[in-house]
């Protein structure tokens, strides 16, 4: 008997072709496994229905590469508010999520990444979180008709039409739903009608800049990752990203994800803002800010100061002194504490009535002050500001002489305590720090023999050398 092969039969593959096919199958299987290893998120309750649950618990199963990466975990969202992540071990992370107050369906884009001690950009994963909306559907039919609404595989109702033939159905709408089917049953006969679902536009853009902060040793380069939640691949010409300083360069697009490189030659500003928009989509925008962080630490400087004091009356006196200053950046509140000891002197001729000889008075001022200041800026900032208050005590020596014959008169020592206010700035230059201050104090001496003002308005400048520095 002779048989013929079917038309679509092919010769048996050779051994080499079999090996190639097997290798290709294994490669596809590995690729599918890698795709399944992407970061996933589950919510409790599920699904999320806007307006019904004020807080949702999210559990992330991290990509193995992300789970094993060193550094602190970061979470952000473009819609709603997300809490701090809690590591559950085994690549699982939990975080609380507060959905937005709006009730129309939308998609939240969650960004998750890890940052180590270096200032290198991080690998960011974007995860979509579906937020179902609720709408009231007004349906009409014959009075007494049984009305339902079908959306996908879910059916809502029944509601019965009143005397006017109208009824209201509460329907859950998932993101991406474009229409629903209304069913009316009267006398055992069911009719169907498809109606369009109109959803208000919402924000579909999410952006993340890494590193998320400019720490000490920042290289001046960062990466901006943008996710545009649309169907199909994103046309890069539609998305526009801008930086308030530096240069932003488009590097590439992969599906709905775009990547940019940011560079800033020289020392970057204390804050850089990135704005992302999309053509034809006014509801979508993203804004992220890259800021310099305060590195916890301290420094101690000593030096000298010189200036002039005006007593707000008739006394003008130069002043010299020694200065010590300690700066503390505790991560939240940058502070400065200072101790200064000075010296000043003034001389004045006092003319009395004709019968009274001309008198020369000499004044010696030895002020000692303790100051506390708010000093924003990092320890390495070239220019800084400071403002604060303190306490000062001026040791005052008052001596008088008759001008004819230089005959000594009074020789008295008194203390003049006072609070003080001051403000100024610093400039790190050379091996230390140049500073300038404006100081206001009221150090009055009210004695039986004399009265004077040892305080007043002072302008002083100086230079401090750094003698100690450390990190917390």
Image (tube, grey):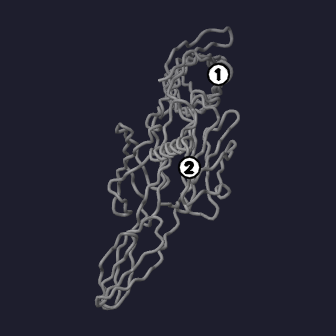
Of labels 1 and 2, earlier in sequence is 2
**Side of 342 relative to 164 (left or right):** right
Q: Residue under label 2, please give it.
A: 207
Front residue of this view, candidates 392 and 327: 327
The single residue placed furthest to the front in the displayed view is 1
Write down the residue under mark 1.
462
- Distance of mark 1 from mark 2, alpha carbons? 46 Å
**Residue 317 appears in the figure:** no
Q: Is residue 32 visible to the viewer in this orientation of the structure?
A: yes
341 to 109, vertically: above or below: above
- For the image, the number of numbered tags is 2
Q: Secondary structure at mark 1?
A: strand
How many C-alpha atoms fall within 10 Å of the one at disc 2: few (<14), some, or many (≥20)?
Answer: many
**Crowd around label 1: few <14 · some 14–19 · many ≥20 (10 Å):** some
Q: Quadrant of residue 341?
A: top right
Residue 402 sits above or below residue 250 on the image: above
Percent of width and height locating residue 335 = 50, 29
Q: Which marked residue is nearer to the observer: mark 1 or mark 2?
A: 2
Residue drawn 50% across the image and 43% down it: 22
- Residue 338's place in the image compared with 95, above or below, is above
Q: Secondary structure at mark 2?
A: strand
**Left or right: 102 as drawn, with respect to 282:** left
Q: Percent from the top left, x then y, of residue 435?
A: 64, 26
Position of residue 96 measured from the top left corner of the image (x, y, whole percent): 37, 49
x%, y% of residue 342?
Answer: 58, 17
At a point 32% along the width and 56% down the height, the residue shown is 45
Q: Residue at x 58, y 46 (%)?
A: 225
Viewer-side residue, 113 vs 403: 113
């Amino acid at each position: 008997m002779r048989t013929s092969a079917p038309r679509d039969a092919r010769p048996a593959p050779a051994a080499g072709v079999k090996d190639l096919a097997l290798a290709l199958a294994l490669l596809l299987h590995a690729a599918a496994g890698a795709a399944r290893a992407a970061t996933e998120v589950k919510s409790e309750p599920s699904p999320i229905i806007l307006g019904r649950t004020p807080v949702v618990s999210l559990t992330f199963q991290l990509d193995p590469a992300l789970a094993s990466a060193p550094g602190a975990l970061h979470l952000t969202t473009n819609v709603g508010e997300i809490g701090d992540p809690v590591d559950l071990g085994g690549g699982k992370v939990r975080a609380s999520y507060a959905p937005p107050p709006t009730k129309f369906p939308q998609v939240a884009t969650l960004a998750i990444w890890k940052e180590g001690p270096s200032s290198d950009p991080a690998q960011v994963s974007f995860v979509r979180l579906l937020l179902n909306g609720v709408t009231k559907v007004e349906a009409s039919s014959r009075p007494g008709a049984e009305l339902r609404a079908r959306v996908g595989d879910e059916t809502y109702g029944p509601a019965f039409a009143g005397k006017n033939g109208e009824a209201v159905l509460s329907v859950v709408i998932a993101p991406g739903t474009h229409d629903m089917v209304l069913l009316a049953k009267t006398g055992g006969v069911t009719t169907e009608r498809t109606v369009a679902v109109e959803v208000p536009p919402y924000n579909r853009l999410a952006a993340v800049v890494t590193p998320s902060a400019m720490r000490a040793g920042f290289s001046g380069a960062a990466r901006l990752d943008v996710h545009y939640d649309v169907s199909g691949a994103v046309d890069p010409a539609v998305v526009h990203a801008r930086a308030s300083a530096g240069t932003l360069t488009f590097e590439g697009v992969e599906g709905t994800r775009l990547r940019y490189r940011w560079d800033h030659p020289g020392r970057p500003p204390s804050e850089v803002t990135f704005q992302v928009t999309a053509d034809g989509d006014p509801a979508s925008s993203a804004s992220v800010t890259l800021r310099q962080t305060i590195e916890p630490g301290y420094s101690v400087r000593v030096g000298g100061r010189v200036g002039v004091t005006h007593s707000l009356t008739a006394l003008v006196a130069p002043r010299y002194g020694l200065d010590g200053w300690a700066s503390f950046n505790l991560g939240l509140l940058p502070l400065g504490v200072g101790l200064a000891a000075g010296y000043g002197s003034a001389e004045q001729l006092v003319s009395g009535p004709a019968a009274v000889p001309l008198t020369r008075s000499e004044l010696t001022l030895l002020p000692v002050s303790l100051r506390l200041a708010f000093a924003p800026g990092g320890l390495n900032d070239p220019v800084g500001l400071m403002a604060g208050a303190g306490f000062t005590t001026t040791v005052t020596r008052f001596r008088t002489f008759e001008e004819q014959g230089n005959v000594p008169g009074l020789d008295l020592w008194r203390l003049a305590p006072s609070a003080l206010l001051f403000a100024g700035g610093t400039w790190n230059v050379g091996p230390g720090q140049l500073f300038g201050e404006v100081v206001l104090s009221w150090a009055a001496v009210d004695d039986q023999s004399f009265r004077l003002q040892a305080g007043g308005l002072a302008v002083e400048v100086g230079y401090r050398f750094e003698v100690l520095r450390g990190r917390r």
